[in-house]
Image (cartoon, rainbow, N blue to C red):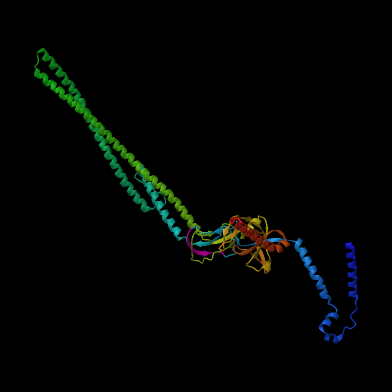
């Protein structure tokens, strides 16, 4: 039934359309100059409508419907933008001075190709050369002193001086060797003389003790005979007492001689110990002095080598084959310090990398390998377009900028290191400012169009929910 009514309406509408299309112009319509003087109402009613207007009347809704359909189904790439700069790749070498010095010569320019080992800059090495000469002289002096101590330990009258020793220092050390050797020999001789005296005293005491033993035997025998004669009544008692007195005195003398022998032997042992201690102490002291000098000589030898290397390092050499980039603007005569960058040598076949920062909220949709388009802001965009590349690394660490926003660093590698600008091949150099456009995935056009409305609706809904919760809490607190 519904379809029948619709069919009848369609037939009527079609007949009316055809009748209107075939209708002839109104016979009373003025033509020529008279048509220009008709009232506006009659002019509008009797003048046929323009075909352009009828076409626009149908074209506008058709275009709107087409755009709406396209927005509902078409997908476009979602782009996240980050700003950064060109940085040297891992193969690039940054050069710094190893020691403070004054820049005396610059032999290269930015963009110049250099070979490995080529001299790029020169610094004033007077300070290091002076330090090396001073250390070398001190090392040679210690070598001569060590030679003197070795000769002294071996009791030699002449030292074996090194071939590169200073002649004046050798003569001084030779005289000192002779003086020390003479003094040591005198002390040894004095100690030995005391030992000899103690030996002689022991010998004298032993001789006296031997003689006293013989006398004691004779006095003992005489006293015994005097006693027998007194007992037989042949001898006088006075003779016996006199003989016995001499025997006792000789015995006491023997005891004294034995004690003297012990004292002389103790003095001899002490003298021998002092002589031995003097020799051993001399050897130990001089050996300790020699060990200290040898240790100091080893340190000085290392220092001589180090200062010699530092004086050689005053020539800044290229570590690799490459191209000079980021040449620091230090004029000749400027003092440079260790760690202060001088220049960067970039390999000719190196890859260009970008260090950029993205907002923290976008880190979750960025991952390694995503395609990017890099626009060097140094040049105009229409000149070359975007340089293709891909995301190399993404860091989760967030840093705060001056405005308080959190950003995370990413690393991007470009597919090429040059760009055509005005018909000229330009090599991208570290430090150039760039804008990185990261393709994070396709999205429907309707999401772009409706996203502001959806965000606004979500915010309003959240505010309404907060209001409802606040009112509910107020009523609960009031027990209403």
Task: Depth check: give the residue in front, 189 or 6.
Answer: 6
The vertical placement of 294 against 36, above or below, is above
Residue 101 falls inside the magenta stretch = yes
Please give the name of the residue rendered at 79% of the width and 66% of the height, measured from the top-left corner: 65
Residue 213 falls inside the magenta stretch = no
Task: Depth check: give the residue in front, 480 or 58.
Answer: 480
The N terminus, quarter of image: bottom right
Task: Give the magenta-colored segment's residue range.
Answer: 99-108
Q: How far across and how far down the image is residue 12, in percent?
A: 90, 69
**Position of 202 compared to 167: left or right?**
left
**Position of 109 compared to 424: left or right?**
left
**Position of 251 compared to 437: left or right?**
left
Task: Depth check: give the residue in front, 239 or 83.
Answer: 83
Please give the name of the residue rendered at 31% of the width and 37% of the height, measured from the top-left corner: 276
The vertical placement of 260 against 476, above or below, is above
Task: Depth check: give the residue in front, 20 or 163.
Answer: 20
């Amino acid at each position: 039934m519904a379809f029948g009514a619709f069919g009848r309406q369609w037939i009527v509408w079609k007949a009316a359309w055809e009748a209107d299309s075939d209708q002839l112009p109104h016979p009373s319509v003025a033509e020529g100059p008279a048509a220009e003087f008709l009232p506006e109402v009659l002019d509008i009613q009797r003048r046929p409508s323009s075909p352009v207007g009828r076409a626009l009347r149908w074209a506008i809704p058709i275009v709107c419907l087409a755009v709406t359909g396209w927005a509902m189904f078409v997908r476009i790439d979602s782009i996240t933008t980050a700003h950064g700069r060109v940085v040297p790749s891992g193969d690039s070498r940054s050069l710094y001075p190893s020691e403070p010095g004054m820049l005396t010569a610059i032999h290269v320019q930015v963009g110049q190709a250099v070979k490995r080992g080529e001299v790029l800059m020169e610094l004033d090495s007077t300070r290091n050369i002076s330090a090396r000469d001073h250390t070398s002289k001190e090392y040679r002096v210690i070598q001569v002193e060590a030679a003197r101590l070795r000769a002294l330990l071996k009791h030699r009258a002449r030292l074996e001086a090194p071939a590169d020793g200073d002649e004046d220092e050798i003569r001084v050390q030779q005289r000192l060797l002779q003086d020390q050797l003479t003094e040591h020999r005198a002390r040894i001789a004095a100690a030995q003389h005391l030992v000899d005296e103690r030996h002689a005293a022991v010998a004298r005491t032993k001789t006296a003790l031997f003689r006293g033993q013989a006398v004691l035997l004779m006095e003992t025998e005489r006293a015994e005979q005097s006693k027998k004669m007194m007992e037989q009544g042949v001898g006088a008692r006075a003779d016996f007492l006199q003989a016995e007195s001499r025997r006792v005195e000789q015995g006491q003398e023997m005891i004294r001689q034995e004690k003297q022998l012990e004292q002389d032997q103790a003095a001899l042992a002490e003298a021998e110990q002092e002589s031995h201690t003097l020799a051993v102490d001399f050897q130990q002291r001089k050996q300790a002095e020699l060990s200290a000098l040898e240790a100091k000589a080893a340190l000085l030898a290392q220092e001589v080598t180090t200062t010699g290397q530092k004086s050689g390092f005053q020539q800044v050499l290229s570590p690799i084959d490459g191209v000079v980039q980021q040449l620091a603007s230090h004029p000749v005569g400027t003092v440079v310090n260790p760690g202060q960058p001088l220049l960067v040598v970039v390999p000719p076949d190196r890859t260009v990398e970008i260090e950029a920062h993205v907002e923290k909220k976008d880190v979750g949709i960025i991952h390694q390998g995503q395609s990017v388009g890099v626009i060097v802001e140094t040049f105009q965009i229409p000149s070359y377009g975007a340089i293709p590349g891909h995301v190399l690394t993404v860091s989760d660490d967030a840093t705060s900028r001056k405005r308080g926003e959190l950003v995370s660093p990413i690393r991007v590698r470009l597919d090429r290191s040059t760009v055509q600008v005005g018909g000229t091949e330009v090599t991208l150099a570290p430090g150039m400012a760039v804008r990185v456009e990261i393709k994070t995935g396709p999205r429907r056009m309707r999401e772009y169009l409706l996203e502001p409305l959806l965000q606004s609706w979500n915010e309003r809904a959240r505010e309404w929910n907060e209001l409802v919760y606040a009112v509910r809490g107020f009523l609960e607190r009031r027990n209403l």
